[in-house]
Image (tube, rainbow, N blue to C red):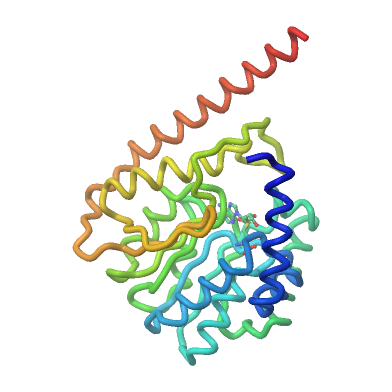
Amino acid sequence: MNTNFKAVLRKIFLYYEQVTNSKFYHLREQTNGMLLPLVYKKIYQLCLQLPDLDIIEVGGAAGTGSIAIGWSIRDSQKKSKLIVVEKCQGGTRTDVGGYAENLELIQKHFENFGVTEQVRLFPQELTFNNGQEAIALINTQKIAAFIHDADGRIDRDFYLFWPLLQPGGLIIVDDYANEAKFQPISDRHPQGGAKSLLTYRLLNQIIEWGLFQTTYKVGKTIFGIKPHHADFSRFNLKICQKIIADVHKEHSNYLKQHELVLARR
Ligand SMILES: C[S@@+](CC[C@H](N)C(=O)[O-])C[C@H]1O[C@@H](n2cnc3c(N)ncnc32)[C@H](O)[C@@H]1O
């Protein structure tokens, strides 16, 4: 679809949301949220129904999704917490400033929207190495949900958090789309436009292993559950690494091709 036409459609839809979904429309406006208001509403409604177990979210940005989840914990009078993982620098965060400015902004939003009590922040880049530090913030035996809206490395998040998730627990993944917007890797674009493709291929493999059962899809956000009786021994990090390497290869081939075309002009 033509990008201008897409932008117009989005504007019309946002206007509709302003009228029909004003609570999440205004939350998104005031915190610069990146998902559609209806996605935040869906996250809120699904989290409202979860058992009183901690939740982990990777990719808090300025806190919009985290606030929707925090509200669901507060409104259902649960004692559990949301652990928000946010690296506070690079990528879209450069639009706000450096680490200190981003940390201050997300904390201010948690305060302003009344979820400080419900949220624990892990303000670091999540890696395989420091995953246990994030997990140490979980205070319940199991978790009710995990959410990924970060860098497309869902292999890391499934490896770290899937075993902790209760059977039937909620999994939300953003940027699930078979599309590439390849461009050079930079501080502003650390995945070089490969995030959606990476997410798409990795999640398709995870679905094939029977570790994610899709329940809904809204735009590029996919909702699912941890199937009962799923077998985590099928999860294979080597296969994930091969998928990642293939996407990196396609990315660099595309850039080389593109440079050649430019050089010929
Ligand atoms: C698309 S934004 C998240 C949007 C947010 N969920 C919302 O509701 O507006 C992605 C965020 O993930 C963060 N991020 C990316 N990779 C990360 C990682 N490995 N660890 C922690 N945060 C990460 C980025 O800094 C960025 O703020």
The residue depicted at 52 percent of the width and 25 percent of the height is 250
The residue depicted at 60 percent of the width and 40 percent of the height is 191
* Quadrant where the N terminus is found in the figure: top right
Numbered label tally? 0
Q: Residue 114, relative to residue 236: is it above or below? A: below
In this rendering, position of residue 54 left or right of residue 3: left
The residue depicted at 41 percent of the width and 48 percent of the height is 155
Q: Is residue 107 visible?
A: no
Q: In which quarter of the image is residue 28?
A: bottom right
Seen as rendered, the residue at the extreme top is 264
In this rendering, position of residue 154 left or right of residue 226: right
**Position of residue 101 measured from the top left corner of the image (x, y, whole percent):** 78, 63
**Position of residue 165 measured from the top left corner of the image (x, y, whole percent):** 34, 67
Q: Is residue 254 visible?
A: yes
**Position of residue 162 measured from the top left corner of the image (x, y, whole percent):** 35, 60
Q: Residue 107, relative to residue 98: is it above or below? A: below
Q: Nearer the viewer, residue 188 or 50?
A: 50
* Quadrant where the C terminus is found in the figure: top right
In this rendering, position of residue 76 left or right of residue 37: left
Seen as rendered, the residue at the extreme bottom is 77
Q: Residue 12, relative to residue 143: is it above or below? A: above
Q: Nearer the viewer, residue 78 or 32?
A: 32
The residue depicted at 68 percent of the width and 30 percent of the height is 184
**Position of residue 35 measured from the top left corner of the image (x, y, whole percent):** 62, 61
Q: Residue 70, relative to residue 204: is it above or below? A: below
Q: Nearer the viewer, residue 228 or 107?
A: 228
Q: In the image, ligand 1 is in what quadrant?
A: bottom right
Q: Which of 11 and 141 is in front in this view?
A: 11
